[in-house]
Image (tube, rainbow, N blue to C red):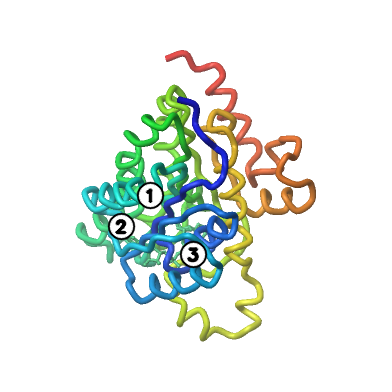
């Protein structure tokens, strides 16, 4: 069966109660996609549900922990029962306390990995049979500067973000045969710092918030990627900022160049050369 990339798409966004995931979910909703949003924070999830309803989006909002595989499988089941397919899964949720190595207890380390990296596995594992059966789809993780650099007090976070890239690079080799794309997308723009709740962010001075990109605008990059045939871009790290700028300047059918979709075009070319020549 050929993968049906025709609208309306069906999308799942984890950790969409606030922040970037909230913007991605709203962008999908506004594009006409049916969208499921999960989060563990019930209060912010309710605010997200109200925002999606105000947009007129066809939405399903579920409180669910992405670190729990059975719960993630149940989310996928509910989406497919309701809409018949699941075209794109964005694993956006993260738990990121800024703490030193001394403060990183084994339990703390494990929880961070279970959400950020385990959540990526859980999403892919949960949606894999459905995407194979329907003939394809997109699995998207979220990239960061921490995907390839180290930062103070981000021991687990940097490990997670590096790990997600490894997951994408290796799984893309296997997913290609099923017409499933596995990529990451970074914000590629300054956004609200991770961890800040809606209320904490709103309490900051206007001049601080004015420096942040609109997550709903950045979400358009995810909508664009999800509309691409899965074999076109697979195993890569993209960035929403450059994609959104390109969409505004040239429209969705722009002539492709790595510079137009990522802050790291050299990495894009190096990966492509590896994939093109890899015979293992
Ligand atoms: N904010 C930045 O500057 C920045 C930069 C680069 C990458 N990112 C990435 O963007 C993504 C979103 O980050 P953000 O800045 O919007 O963060 P955020 O803290 O505002 O949002 C994360 C959301 O995930 C939810 N969440 C946490 N644990 C969960 C779990 N176990 N199951 C389901 N949901 C859970 C939280 O409740 C929250 O709503 C993350 O992957 C992050 O690494 C953010």
Depth check, front residue: 149 or 91: 91
| Quadrant position of residue 178 | top left
First-in-chain label (1 vs 3): 3
Q: Which residue is mark 3?
A: 22
Give the alpha-carbon distance from disc 1 to disc 3, as whole Å.
21 Å
The circle drawn on residue 160 is 1
User: Left or right of 248: which side holds 272?
Assistant: left
- Local SS, label 3: helix
Assess whether mark 3 and mark 1 are in contact (beta carbons under 8 angstroms).
no
Residue most toward the top? 279
- Residue 87 vs 177, above or below: the answer is below
Q: Is residue 200 visible?
A: yes
- Local SS, label 1: helix
| Quadrant position of residue 98 | bottom left
The residue shown at (61%, 50%) is: 221
User: Left or right of 190: which side holds 127?
Assistant: left
Depth check, front residue: 256 or 25: 25
The residue shown at (42%, 67%) is: 17
- Residue 138 vs 208, above or below: the answer is above
Q: Is mark 3 within 8 Å of ligand 1?
A: yes
Q: Is mark 1 within 8 Å of ligand 1?
A: yes
Depth check, front residue: 245 or 216: 216
Q: Nearer the viewer, mark 1 or mark 3?
A: 3
Label 2 packing within 10 angstroms: few (<14), some (14-19), many (20+): many
Image coords of residue 33 (percent x, y): 53, 52
Which corner quadrant of the figure contains ligand 1?
A: bottom left
- Local SS, label 2: helix
């Amino acid at each position: 069966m050929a993968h049906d990339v025709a609208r309306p798409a069906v999308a799942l966004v984890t950790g969409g109660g606030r922040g970037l995931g909230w913007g991605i979910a709203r962008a999908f909703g506004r594009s006409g996609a049916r969208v499921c949003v999960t989060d563990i924070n019930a209060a912010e999830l309710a605010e997200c549900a109200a925002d999606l309803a105000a947009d007129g989006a066809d939405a399903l909002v579920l409180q669910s922990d992405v670190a729990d595989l059975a719960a993630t499988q149940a989310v996928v089941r509910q989406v497919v029962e309701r809409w018949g397919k699941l075209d794109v899964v964005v694993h956006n949720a993260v738990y990121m306390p800024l703490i030193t190595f001394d403060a990183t207890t084994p339990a703390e380390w494990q929880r961070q990995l279970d959400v950020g990296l385990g959540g990526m596995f859980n999403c892919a594992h949960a949606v894999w049979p459905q995407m194979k059966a329907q003939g394809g789809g997109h699995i998207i993780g979220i990239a960061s500067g921490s995907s390839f650099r180290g930062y103070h007090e981000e021991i687990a976070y940097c490990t997670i973000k590096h790990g997600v890239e490894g997951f994408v690079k290796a799984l893309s080799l296997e997913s290609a045969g099923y017409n499933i794309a596995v990529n990451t997308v970074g914000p590629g723009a300054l956004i609200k710092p991770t961890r800040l709740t809606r209320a904490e962010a709103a309490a900051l001075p206007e001049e601080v918030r004015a420096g942040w990109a609109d997550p709903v605008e950045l979400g358009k990059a995810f909508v664009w990627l999800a509309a691409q045939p899965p074999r076109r871009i697979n195993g890569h790290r993209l960035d929403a900022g450059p994609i959104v700028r390109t969409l505004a300047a040239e429209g969705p059918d722009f002539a492709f160049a790595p510079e137009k979709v990522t802050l790291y075009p050299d990495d894009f070319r190096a990966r492509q050369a590896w994939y093109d020549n890899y015979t293992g």
